[in-house]
Image (cartoon, rainbow, N blue to C red):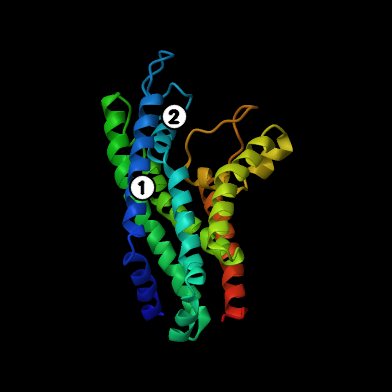
Amino acid sequence: MPGAIRAEFRKYFTTRMWWGMAIAVFVVSAGFAALFGFLMTMDQTGAPPGQQFGGSPEEVAKSVYTAGLGVAYLLTLAVGVMQIGSEYRHKTITSTFLAVPKRSVVMGAKVLSLLVIGAMYGLVSLAGSVGVGAAVLSARGAEVFPSASVGRTLALSLLVLGLWALIGLGAGILIPNQVAALLISVGVAWIVEPLVGFAFTFWDWGQDVAQYLPSAATQAMVGGVTGGPTGEAAQLQWWAGALVLAGYAVVLAGIGSWRTVRADIS
């Protein structure tokens, strides 16, 4: 297993994609943090800095520091898809299984390496969002770290990106064509699922269902300001959101790994 994990890291970090993704994650996180920092401290209602949008100082700080997470997890989702999809596309999956005959070891190495890669991008994201967001909040007179729960949110954001990478791994296995897997997984995560979740919020029963969708579980983990067309949106506790998102990752990556272990690879 250690050798298989090193091989997975070598496959990823010897390409130019890893630092291109790192730059994209950093820029997106810093840009959204700056934008949300200014928007959420605008003096429009006479309220104290950081409370114009009805959120507590903790919620505002969390929202600023995780503002770019919605785009960052789409990038790690794409990394997960390509981690397996590129092997099928370039026909290297055969040599991989010949080098490590136990397919379960290969898939285990991919899962563990993706968790680490996702956490690495989480650190890159935090470097951009906290560095810029804290500067903006401080300059606007808002609290930068109002409570310890903000630190918990920053730690959970590392887990978020790792879990979305595993969701991408499952999607990349279940959809054999890499391009189709990228388009479908990103399209569903970015457009379809948020629209479905928004539609659910118009009904009381729908709000109970919507909170278990992946993006809602992600939002519950990081705990920013929430709301819907009927008022305050239903939201899970942070630990429940983590369990739900982990459930999606385990199911998709587990089914994909099981299929790979049993499939005929030629």
- Crowding at dot 2, Cα within 10 Å, few <14 / some 14-19 / many 20+, comes out as some
Number of numbered markers: 2
Residue 125: x and y, percent?
35, 47
98, 48: nearer the viewer = 98
State left or right for residue 197 relative to residue 114: right
Q: Name which residue lies at 53% across and 55% down.
A: 182
154, 67: nearer the viewer = 67
State left or right for residue 145 relative to residue 53: left
Q: Secondary structure at mark 2?
A: loop
The label shown at residue 56 is 2
- In the figure, residue 79 lies in which quadrant? bottom left
State left or right for residue 125 relative to residue 239: left
Q: Secondary structure at mark 1?
A: helix
* Mark 1 → mark 2, Cα distance in angstroms: 30 Å
Residue 73: x and y, percent?
46, 50
Residue 75 in the image: above or below residue 28? below
Q: Name which residue lies at 45% across and 84% down.
A: 100
Residue 50: x and y, percent?
38, 25
| On-image quarter of the N terminus | bottom left
Q: Name which residue lies at 62% across and 80% down.
A: 262
The label shown at residue 130 is none
Q: Name which residue lies at 40% across and 25% down.
A: 39
Residue 121: x and y, percent?
36, 54
Residue 128 in the image: above or below residue 85? above
Query: Does residue 145 appear in this view?
Result: yes
Of badges 1 and 2, the one in the foreground is 1
Find the residue positioned furthest to the front: 90
Residue 237 in the image: above or below residue 40? below
Q: Amino acid at mark 2?
A: Ser
The label shown at residue 24 is 1
Q: Amino acid at mark 1?
A: Ala
